[in-house]
Image: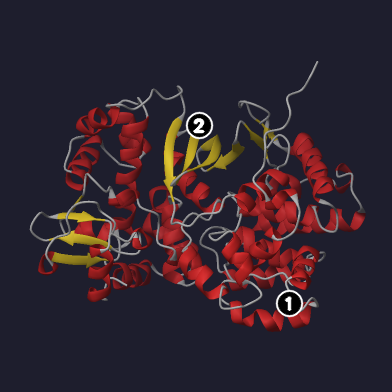
């Protein structure tokens, strides 16, 4: 979009927040870059330059605006909508892969040479993988500086910098302030944080409808791993350098995020996973505009616009849970998963009712089948899926190839079209994944006057592409089910 100068200028003039994260505005006279909705007086048209990423603006010598904080804008929706090389690379970079494995590791995961990856990213984003990772390190550093009491040297290494000197230089260059000055500015009027907890605000594009999103997460929460408590969704996180816990609660204009990590180097990856879980980088205006063109869906969209797709923080975990819960009720699926977690999960010390990390695919693949108390068919499907994940035969990771992943899933015994579709929707994040055989979808479709048989509904839904996963959310939300509504806190136990 950044090449459409007239459209970018109109967005800046109108301070349109819908375009935050789509492009960045650089001001040639001040050498500052902003988000389109920056509250400052817009510069003259001839003084504006537009960049597709914060990294490209930083590489061109611009520093971040102190008023609108463009580095903290929602991510571009393009990277979660697409399945090509650039989108896969951006998802991996957001997950911290360059900091952990370098550019060669990024390229290896994508199946391309480092030169090819560099060339494609430069062509579309104006910055290579190192510059993009550097921009993310700067944002991670800023979060740690402003929300923790860590010494600056610890902040530097937790954010992924190789030295304190590189950390200081980058923070000064990107934000125009020394790290200590950033902390002083942030400390004015900020309430004290709980020791060991990082308090963040996760932005999103309006409109945002949290009911079905948090309702679904609460209704399917696995005891010990997840819970709804004190008006927030809580869960444990398995991360590259350790583990952590997070609480997420909807607030006006943002999601309140409280993270507790055993290793601060996991911060960027944890934030990326939380954003992906809640689908916060979606473009609801584009989704709803297309779905409203269907007269049957339009009333559902108008009733509560801005629905998101509840996704996951761990694709492998979700896939295992999907197979475990096939052809049983939501309550039964939670019970089966809870037993699996208690018997084979990793115990952790965490607040509330969080007690375990979900078992890894490797741990489950190594089990004796007799250790799993469940019907033989489901046990066989679960173990075969675990083996495929553990061996690398099936890759559901952040930068995986969606088409290949679906093909492998479809070939696994016991993994039918519904299971493959729900994994594509929630674990892979495919915005066009569709599950026409789902009973709730068929029931809601019939009530809305849509075809109710899977074949006819699939043919009708061609017009909803590429947003069929969102159409499913609107249909599900039309059902009178707890997962379609904002959850309430459980009643206190009485002695």
Q: Which residue is mark 1?
A: 450
Q: Which residue is mark 2?
A: 260
**Residue ID at (22%, 66%):** 50
Residue 435 locus on image (x, y percent): 72, 69
Q: For residue 334, which numbered disc appears in the image? A: none
Residue 87 locus on image (x, y percent): 44, 67
Residue 351 locus on image (x, y percent): 61, 25
Camera sees residue 412: no
Q: Is residue 444 left or right of residue 88?
A: right
Q: Quadrant of residue 116?
A: bottom left
Comparing 485 with 347, the one in front is 485
Locate the C terminus and report the quarter of the image it occupies.
top right
**Residue ID at (41%, 69%):** 86
Counting residues from the N terminus, which is met first, the one under dot 2 or under dot 1?
2
Compared to residue 387, the image places residue 79 above or below, namely below
Q: Secondary structure at mark 2?
A: strand
Q: Which numbered disc, 2 or 1, marks the residue closer to the eye?
A: 1
Single out the residue that lies furthest toward the right.
Answer: 375
**Residue ID at (30%, 64%):** 23
Q: Secondary structure at mark 1?
A: loop
């Amino acid at each position: 979009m950044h090449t459409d100068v007239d459209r970018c200028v109109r967005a800046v003039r109108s301070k349109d927040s819908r375009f935050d994260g789509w492009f960045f505005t650089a001001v040639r006279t001040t050498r500052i870059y902003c988000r389109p909705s920056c509250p400052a007086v817009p510069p003259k048209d001839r003084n504006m330059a537009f960049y597709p990423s914060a990294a490209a603006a930083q590489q061109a010598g611009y520093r971040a605006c102190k008023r609108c904080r463009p580095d903290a804008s929602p991510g571009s929706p393009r990277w979660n909508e697409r399945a090509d090389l650039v989108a896969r690379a951006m998802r991996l970079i957001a997950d911290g892969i360059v900091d952990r494995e370098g550019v060669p590791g990024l390229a290896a995961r994508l199946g391309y040479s480092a030169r090819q990856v560099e060339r494609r990213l430069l062509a579309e984003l104006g910055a290579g993988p190192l510059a993009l990772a550097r921009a993310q390190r700067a944002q991670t550093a800023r979060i740690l500086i402003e929300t923790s009491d860590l010494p600056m040297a610890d902040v530097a290494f937790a954010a992924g910098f190789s030295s304190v000197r590189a950390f200081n230089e980058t923070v000064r260059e990107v934000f125009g302030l020394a790290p200590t000055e950033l902390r002083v500015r942030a400390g004015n009027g900020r309430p004290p944080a709980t020791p060991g907890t990082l308090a963040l605000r996760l932005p999103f594009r309006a409109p945002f409808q949290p009911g079905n999103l948090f309702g679904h997460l609460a209704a399917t929460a696995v005891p010990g791993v997840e819970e709804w408590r004190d008006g927030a969704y809580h869960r444990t996180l398995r991360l590259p350098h350790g583990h952590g816990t997070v609480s997420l609660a909807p607030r006006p204009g943002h999601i309140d995020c409280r993270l507790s990590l055993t290793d601060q180097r996991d911060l960027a990856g944890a934030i990326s996973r939380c954003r992906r879980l809640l689908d916060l980088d979606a473009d609801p205006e584009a989704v709803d505009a297309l779905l409203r063109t269907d007269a049957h869906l339009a009333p559902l969209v108008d009733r509560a616009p801005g629905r998101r797709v509840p996704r996951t923080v761990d694709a492998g975990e979700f896939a295992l849970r999907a197979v475990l819960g096939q052809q049983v009720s939501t309550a039964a699926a939670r019970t089966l998963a809870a037993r699996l977690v208690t018997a084979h999960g990793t115990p952790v010390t965490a607040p509330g009712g969080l007690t375990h990390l979900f078992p890894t695919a490797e741990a489950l693949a190594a089990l004796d089948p007799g250790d799993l108390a469940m019907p033989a068919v489901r046990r066989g499907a679960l173990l075969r899926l675990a083996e495929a994940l553990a061996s690398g035969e099936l890759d559901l990771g952040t930068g995986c190839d969606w088409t290949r992943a679906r093909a492998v899933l479809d070939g696994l015994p016991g993994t039918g079209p519904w299971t493959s579709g729900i994994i594509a929707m929630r674990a892979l994040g495919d915005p066009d994944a569709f599950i026409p055989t789902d009973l709730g979808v068929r029931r809601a479709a019939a009530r809305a006057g849509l075809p109710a048989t899977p074949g006819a509904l699939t043919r009708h839904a061609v017009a909803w592409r590429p947003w069929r996963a969102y159409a499913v959310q609107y249909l599900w939300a039309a059902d009178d089910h707890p997962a379609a509504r904002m959850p309430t806190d459980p009643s206190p136990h009485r002695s």
